[in-house]
Amino acid sequence: MWAAKVLEKTLDIATLLGMLGALGVIVLAILIGGSASGFIDTPSLLIVVGGGLLANLVKFPLDQTLGAFKVASRAFVHKPTSSEALIAECMEMAGVARKEGLLGLESLEISNEFLNKGVQMAIDGHDPEFVRRVLNKEINLAIERHEMGESVFKGFGESAPAMGMIGTLVGLVQMMSNMSDPKAIGPAMAVALLTTLYGAVLANVVALPMAEKLAFRTSEERRNRHLILEAVDGIQEGINPRVLESLLSTYLPDNKREPEKKAEEA
């Protein structure tokens, strides 16, 4: 029975593999070319990481910046919610409500918290318009919180390369101010360029991909929550389960819809 299929949080292997793999390829290329010790410079890291984080505090309040790290966990660990499973769950609920009324849903164990909240409000006898308004408000506020986390990481993705360039300019100025030893120019130039490297890596391997993954998670959650909103609304209004199923199936990609539903749309 679908009520037993309560999905636990799982590790997103793709995010972890992609990030570690990209860093691994860069490190491997460095090791093949020579010693990695020349690519480690504490002042450069300080400018890029510290400067990038502090520059982000100018763009965003402290609580939202700190909250972004909590939101970031959604890129690595999340509770997978299948739209097909949600539709199947909602359809069984629609069948029960049609036969036994909304009170018949009280005995059911509902796996999704948002769906459970909507169903409980319907069982309590709230007006469909009120239920719709409350659920819409919750959707908008949840998406707003998630989008703020995305913005923080995008902001760091913009700040890190800029701070890297600033660090490079600082290094070049220091190098130019000490031109008495020609042999020291090469190593000094290499150190100066490290900040640009650090900024590019942090932006393009960590910050910006994290922002994009969070945007994907947000889009996925928005779609599923709107699906639930439609389902609760349909169940509360007593829409025929077959009609409701056709309506909810529009949230699925074409290749996951049943053949007869595709034919109906055609």
Image (cartoon, rainbow, N blue to C red):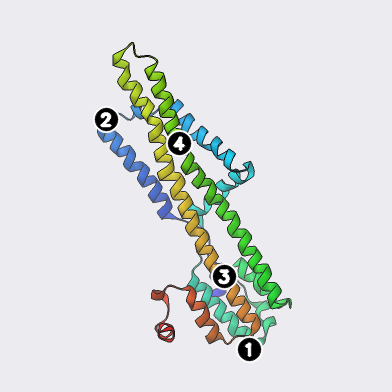
* Residue 90 position in % (x across, y down): 56, 77
Residue 168 visible (yes or no): yes
Q: Quadrant of the C terminus?
A: bottom left
Q: What label sits on residue 34 in the rendered view?
A: 2
Q: Is residue 6 left or right of residue 23?
A: right
Residue 42 falls in image quadrant: top left
Q: Secondary structure at mark 3?
A: helix
Q: Are marks 2 and 3 in contact (CB under 8 Å)?
A: no
* Residue 183 position in % (x across, y down): 29, 15
Location of residue 244 with respect to 186 vertically, above or below: below
Q: Which residue is mark 4?
A: 162
Q: What label sits on residue 99 in the rendered view?
A: 1
| Mark 1 crowd level (few <14, some 14–19, many ≥20, 10 Å Cα) | few
In primary-sequence order, the first of circles 4 and 1 is: 1
| Camera-side residue of 119 and 229 | 229
Q: Secondary structure at mark 1?
A: helix
* Residue 222 position in % (x across, y down): 54, 64
Location of residue 109 with respect to 215 vertically, above or below: below
* 1 vs 2, front mark: 2
Q: Which residue is mark 3?
A: 226
| Camera-side residue of 263 and 31 | 263
Identify which amino acid the numbered label 2 is placed on: Gly
| Mark 2 crowd level (few <14, some 14–19, many ≥20, 10 Å Cα) | few
In primary-sequence order, the first of circles 1 and 2 is: 2
Label 4 to label 3, Cα distance in Å?
39 Å
Which residue occupies 44% across, 44% down? 206
